[in-house]
Image: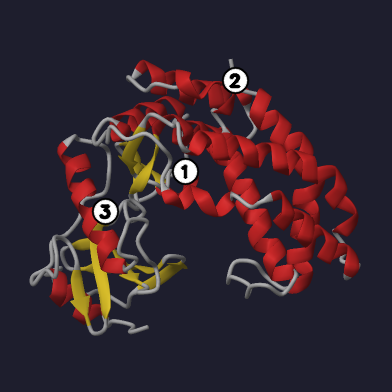
């Protein structure tokens, strides 16, 4: 992909005179850099065109149109988020084209070590985000469906593993009943989830940055629709990191700020279950030669070891997620 020069970025966004080179620090869904100029320090993001939309359309620009509109709404609601820089000649809102690539720029946030618990802030912020665009729809969005595989598919995969004597084949029998039960529950909830909203879509620990003025929610490019309660459960689980009290604290703050969890009952963490099953299915397809390995998966031996670990932990984990709702 086209690597811009510091001068090109500074000129496109009227940032002043560059001081030094672009400092590349992350490659994920986009390349990201830090750029220092005569007017300050900036976060620069260059997108990969292969990243498609969570909505209809399937193209990068389709996703960014939706995401930037929602980001604008969140800014108006005073949600703590980074300050975007408008380009001199915008392609759309805060988006500019430099060479053959789309770019955005934000004011740099000097990240501090977490010096306080963000649980209460996170619960309140999720509730704020979920209240921006309640859609009045029933039924989970399509991106949930890749986690659903027929029992016959899992049985075929596990038979293939045994035929090839793969290292994880002996762990399949204990996991299969739990996989089938969890899949059935996801299938049931698909058509009845009552609280679909537009949401940030990527509440992860690396997307909450601690600034001098407090936590900031960054990276609004993954905006999508979801069940408010099921996303709240997933986020509380991720940030709780196995600590029951931290998970409870996030969920309590969410409810106190107007979030509603009641309908989900013991399925509050169903989105975590969905993620486990989808990751397992993706890795198994690669191990069996049905799909190419994604960049993040690693070597074949690593993939097989990951599958083994997932299968070994799966029965207890799925039972815990179904019945272990925090009080």
Q: Nearer the viewer, mark 2 or mark 1?
A: 2
Q: Nearer the viewer, residue 313 or 161?
A: 161
Give the CA separation, mark 1 to mark 3: 28 Å
> Is 97 left, or right, of 53 in this rendering?
left
Q: Which mark is residue 113?
A: 1
Residue 116: in sight, yes or no? no
N-terminal of the pair, mark 2 or mark 3, is 3
Quarter-wise, where is residue 258 in the image?
top left
- State the residue position of label 3: 67
Residue 113 in picture, x, y percent from top left: 47, 43
Q: Quadrant of the N terminus?
A: bottom left
Q: Which mark is residue 326?
A: 2
Tags 2 and 1 touching, CB below 8 Å: no
Give the residue drawn at x 14%, y 65%.
Answer: 92
Residue 46 in picture, x, y percent from top left: 32, 71
Give the residue drawn at x 13%, y 67%.
Answer: 87
């Amino acid at each position: 992909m086209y690597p811009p020069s510091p001068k090109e970025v500074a000129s496109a966004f009227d940032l002043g005179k560059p001081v030094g080179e672009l400092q590349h620090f992350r490659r994920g869904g986009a390349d990201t850099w830090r750029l220092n100029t005569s007017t300050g320090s900036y976060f620069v993001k260059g997108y990969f065109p292969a990243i498609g939309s969570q909505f209809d359309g399937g193209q990068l620009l389709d996703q960014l149109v939706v995401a930037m509109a929602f980001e604008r709404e969140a800014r108006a609601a005073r949600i703590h988020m980074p300050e975007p820089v408008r380009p001199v000649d915008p392609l759309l809102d805060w988006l500019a084209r430099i060479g053959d690539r789309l770019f955005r720029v934000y004011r740099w946030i000097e990240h501090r070590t977490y010096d306080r618990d963000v649980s209460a802030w996170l619960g309140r912020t999720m509730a704020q985000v979920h209240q921006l665009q309640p859609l009045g729809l029933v039924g989970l969005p399509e991106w949930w469906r890749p986690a659903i595989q027929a029992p016959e598919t899992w049985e075929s995969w596990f038979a293939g593993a045994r035929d090839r004597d793969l290292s994880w084949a002996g762990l399949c029998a204990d996991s299969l009943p739990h996989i089938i039960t969890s899949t059935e529950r996801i299938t049931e909830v698909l058509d009845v989830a009552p609280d679909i909203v537009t949401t940030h879509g990527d509440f992860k620990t690396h997307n909450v940055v601690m600034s001098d003025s407090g936590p900031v929610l960054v990276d609004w490019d993954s905006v999508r629709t979801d069940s408010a309660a099921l996303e709240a459960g997933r986020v509380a689980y991720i940030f709780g990191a196995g600590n029951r009290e931290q998970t409870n604290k996030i969920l309590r703050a969410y409810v106190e700020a107007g979030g509603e969890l009641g309908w989900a009952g013991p399925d509050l963490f169903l989105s975590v279950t969905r993620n486990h099953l989808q990751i397992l299915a993706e890795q198994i397809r690669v191990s069996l030669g049905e799909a190419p390995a994604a960049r993040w998966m690693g070597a074949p031996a690593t993939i097989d070891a990951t599958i083994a670990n997932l299968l070994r932990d799966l029965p207890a984990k799925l039972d815990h997620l179904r019945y272990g709702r925090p009080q």
